[in-house]
Image (cartoon, rainbow, N blue to C red):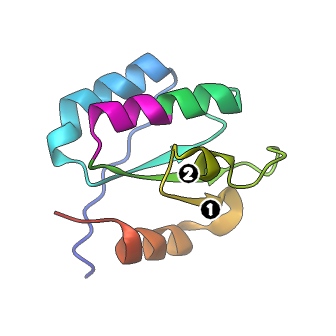
């Protein structure tokens, strides 16, 4: 084992997602953000920046949609620490988290 514990949560609004993070932030090492979840790229970036203010130690990985014109936009803005295309698959996602995310 990698020592990586996971918890899956799906939130449909930014408020719901930030509430979940606030309640669990002491236990979080990393958060995976699916970029289409909140609608526009700007809304997703706003969520990521709010997450950074709430829990600056949390490592943020963005799964970016192929519909976005600018690959890596959240990374370029400093809103996430790493990005992958949504098509990367669970094994690649796990690999990136194990190799990069600071685990407590």
Query: In which quarter of the view is residue 9 placed?
Result: top left
Q: Marks 2 and 1: in contact by CB < 8 Å? A: yes
Q: Main secondary structure of the magenta part?
A: helix
85 or 12, nearer to the observer:
85
The residue sitting at 62% across, 62% down in the picture is 84
Q: Is residue 104 left or right of residue 92?
A: left
Which quadrant: the N terminus? bottom left
Indicate which disc residue 76 carries: none
Secondary structure category for the residue under label 1: strand
CA distance for labels 1 and 2: 6 Å
According to the picture, the residue beneath numbered tag 1 turns out to be: 84
Q: Give coordinates of residue 104: x percent, y percent.
A: 16, 63
Query: In which quarter of the view is residue 67 placed?
Result: top right
According to the picture, the residue beneath numbered tag 2 turns out to be: 62
Q: Which residues are magenta?
A: 48-56
Secondary structure category for the residue under label 2: strand
Residue density around tag 1, few if under 14, some if 14–19, many if 20 or more, within 10 Å: some
Q: Is residue 64 visible?
A: yes
Q: Tell me if residue 19 comes above or below residue 30 in the rendering.
A: above
Q: Give coordinates of residue 92: x percent, y percent.
A: 55, 74
2 falls in the magenta region: no
């Amino acid at each position: 084992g990698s020592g990586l514990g996971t918890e899956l949560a799906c939130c449909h609004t930014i408020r719901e997602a930030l509430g979940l993070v606030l309640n669990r932030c002491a236990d979080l090492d990393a958060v995976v953000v699916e970029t289409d979840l909140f609608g526009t790229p700007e809304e997703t970036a706003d969520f990521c920046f709010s997450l950074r203010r709430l829990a600056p130690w949390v490592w943020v990985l963005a799964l970016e949609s192929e519909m976005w014109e600018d690959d890596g936009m959240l990374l370029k803005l400093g809103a996430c620490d790493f990005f992958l295309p949504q098509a990367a698959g669970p094994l690649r996602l796990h690999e990136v988290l194990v190799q990069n995310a600071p685990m407590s």
